[in-house]
Amino acid sequence: MIITTFSNGVRAVVRRSDSQVSYIGAAIAAGSRDDGEGRDGLAHFVEHTIFKGTRHRSSWHISNRMESIGGELNAYTTKEETLIYTNAPAGHASRAIELIADLIKNATFPAAEIERERDVIIEEIHSYADSPSDAVYDEFDELLYAGSSLAHNILGSEQSVEALTGSDGREFIESRYTPSNIVLYCVDPGDEQKNMRLLEKHFGDLSFIGDERRRRAPEELPPFRETRDRGHQQANTIIGTRLFARNDQRRHALFLLNNILGGPCMNSRLNRELREKRGLVYTVDSALTLMSDCGSMLIYFGSQPGKVEKCARIISDEIARLASDRLSERAFTAARDQYCGQLTVSGDQRENCAMALAKSLLYFGEVHDIAHTAAQIRAVTPDDLRDIAALVASKELSRLTLT
């Protein structure tokens, strides 16, 4: 593996693989919290419309460039990042790298294409609004981060998207897609040095200067408890709290706690208590969102409206139990081994692992692969786990229910 910083500040990581598929992309520290005042949804708008034309290609030529060889060109946006990526049969690294560079450096946001894509984005907004299990997350964030740029959802609103223009898109790229905000990755069976030279050839001249806007950590607000009647059959509830940022050393203990409480396995404590033992829910899970300057832990469950209070009480009791009762060595080792096993399985998902190389370099300044993360998890002790559970238990959890 080679990690390099080009003279203009763009960072890149290249790893040789034994796969017959190339995974290539750009991770950019530009997300919805960077949209700007009155331009909610701009980062996501750019993610959609960057594919609609460059100074050298039409939208058809852009999509066909990778699809014609059986590959894929795609992107996604989060609160803090945008990722533009391709996967394709090996042997086409030059094609993929040049295309992504063209999109970032030369996107033109043609008016006719933008108007069509604007309608697509508004339909996406409507689809989320019609899914209460999705909408409850956005509405919880609006309350948890009220008054900050993290409060609005990633898609924006129908009204804000209607107001966005091609000029807004171009300005956003030139101000946020700057060299210091970009990490490139290439995981490919080809020669590492050659692929690094290709990345430098196409990105070494990127020269967007950006602006002086800086992210501001949101104020921590008092806990809330709300129920909003939307006429649904099921109550969709999130219970959660603000926590620390992604670079906090306690994060590994928190990852383990999250997995024990509401991870993807049937033996998670909340799944056992709420679903398997009592039949109160169909779905319950716990999720962490750790960002550059803050974070949150959210527990979602869907239940009958009359059972929300009981479910919430059981969740609080389980957190309190982990905070007060130190796990036995046997139980702790089993939980730790399970999580490390899940990491090993996830390591077989090559595309996600390739993206993780870039995101790790983007946010930590170094590559944290599966082996590194597993080693950090194995260093967690039962006392560390109890301490992090105590931190969560010490907070009055906020709650939002959509019924």
Image (tube, helix red, strand yellow):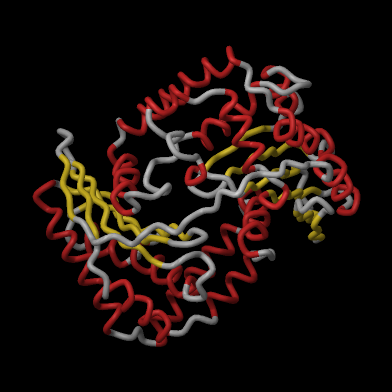
Which residue is pictured at 67% across the width and 40% down the height? Answer: 85
Answer above or below: position of 240 versus 321: above
* Residue 80 as seen in the image, left or right of residue 198: left
Give percent across and percent down for residue 240: 30, 59
All told, the count of numbered labels is 0
Towards the viewer: 186 or 143: 143
Toward which corner of the image does residue 69 lie, by quadrant? top right
Q: Farthest residue in the top direction?
A: 112
- The answer to whether residue 266 is seen in the rendering is no
- The answer to whether residue 5 is seen in the rendering is yes
Towards the viewer: 40 or 387: 40
* Residue 312 as seen in the image, left or right of residue 46: left
Q: Farthest residue in the left direction?
A: 306
Which residue is pictured at 27% across the width and 64% down the height? Answer: 272
Which residue is pictured at 52% across the width and 44% down the height? Answer: 34
Which residue is pictured at 55% across the width and 39% down the height? Answer: 76
Give percent across and percent down for residue 35: 50, 40
Q: Farthest residue in the front direction?
A: 212
* Residue 276 as seen in the image, left or right of residue 375: left
Give percent across and percent down for residue 335: 43, 74
In which quadrant will I find the N terminus? Answer: bottom right
In which quadrant will I find the C terminus? Answer: top left
Toward which corner of the image does residue 169 lie, by quadrant? top right
Answer above or below: position of 104 versus 217: above
* Residue 108 as seen in the image, left or right of residue 343: right
Give percent across and percent down for residue 104: 70, 35
Towards the viewer: 321 or 78: 78
Answer above or below: position of 71 versus 214: above
